[in-house]
Amino acid sequence: MTLQVRGLCKAYGQVVVADQIDLDLSAGQCLGVIGPNGAGKSSLFHLLTGTVSADAGQIVLEGTDISSAPVHRRACLGVARAFQVPQPFGNLSVFQNALAAASFAGGLHGDAAAQAAADALRLCGLAAAADKTAGALPLLDRKRLEMAKAVASGPRLLLLDEVAGGLTEREVHQMVALVGELKQRYAVIWIEHIAQALRAVADRIMVLHFGRKLLEDAPARVMESAIVHEIYMGVPANAAA
Ligand SMILES: Nc1ncnc2c1ncn2[C@@H]1O[C@H](COP(=O)(O)OP(=O)(O)OP(=O)(O)O)[C@@H](O)[C@H]1O
């Protein structure tokens, strides 16, 4: 098991962002995460990466308890995140961006870092763009680079934060194909508002609301569930029965 989370809790005063969250995820699996604005989706990623510390609960990555580990330690152990808004070093080349991720987040040096960067670019469809200036890439390629940086760091757990947001329908298909490739190697958690993208690649979808896991099930069952209709469309669960 790549990731085991037990009883994860976090509140900011009265605002509960994680309420006894349990998760189990293995390499080869993609867990989709949905929920209305403020449900606690981004907070879950902050708690997993360590940018925010939990009030209670346990996070175990490949058998190592990382609950109290700082951000850089978790990154070296294999927690990687691709952000919704790509944040490349705009003046550096695509390759240099991937190399920086392999070096600083992945802890690699010399040839090993260069190899990891090249492999990540190839996997993410950016090999031909390696020498381009990162800031000049079109949006889909900037998103690919965001994923490649995460891959170059040597992840075990890949956290994808709305990586399909802002893309055209055709580009969303390409992103789905890429996530499908990545999940064959890593455990993937994907926060995404685009339902058909999650349906296409997620093995399970978790629904968060006020920090609580309301549901975790196969995508089709989640999308058809009365709970999801209620929290997104205001249709009372008992009215759908
Ligand atoms: N540092 C903080 N201090 C106080 N409240 C916070 C803090 N970070 C998040 N919150 C609150 O916690 C709640 C959950 O926020 P979070 O960003 O996790 O939600 P989300 O599901 O990712 O929402 P969205 O879809 O809008 O990105 C929100 O009400 C937010 O205002």
Image (cartoon, helix red, strand yellow):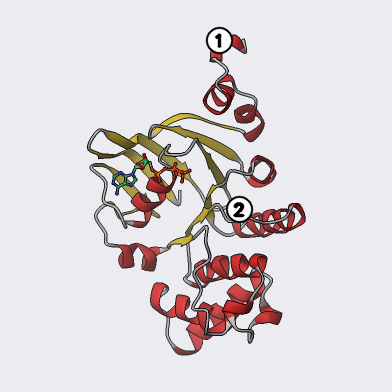
Direction from residue 160 to residue 40 in the image, left or right: left
Q: Secondary structure at mark 1?
A: helix
Q: Which residue is mark 1?
A: 238
Where is residue 161 shown, x and y percent of the image?
51, 53
Q: Amino acid at mark 2?
A: Gly
Vertical side of 51 occupied by 30: above or below? above
Where is residue 13 shown, x and y percent of the image?
22, 37
Whether the residue carrying mark 1 lies under 8 Å from ligand 1 is answered with: no
Q: Which residue is mark 2?
A: 165
- Residue 46, label in figure: none
Which is more toward the observer, 27 or 179?
Answer: 179
Residue displayed at 71% across by 81% down: 128
Residue displayed at 62% across by 78% down: 136
Q: Secondary structure at mark 2?
A: loop
Q: Taking the image as four quarters, which one is ligand 1 found in?
A: top left
Where is residue 117 shown, x and y percent of the image?
55, 79
Direction from residue 61 to residue 184 in the image, left or right: right
Q: Amino acid at mark 1?
A: Asn
Which is more toward the observer, 21 or 131?
Answer: 131
| Mark 2–mark 1 distance (CA, rounded to whole Å) | 32 Å
Q: How many C-alpha atoms fall within 10 Å of the one at disc 2: few (<14), some, or many (≥20)?
A: some
Where is residue 66 shown, x and y percent of the image?
30, 55
Residue displayed at 26% across by 59% down: 69
Do the numbered discs 2 and 1 sit on residues whose CB atoms are within 8 Å? Answer: no
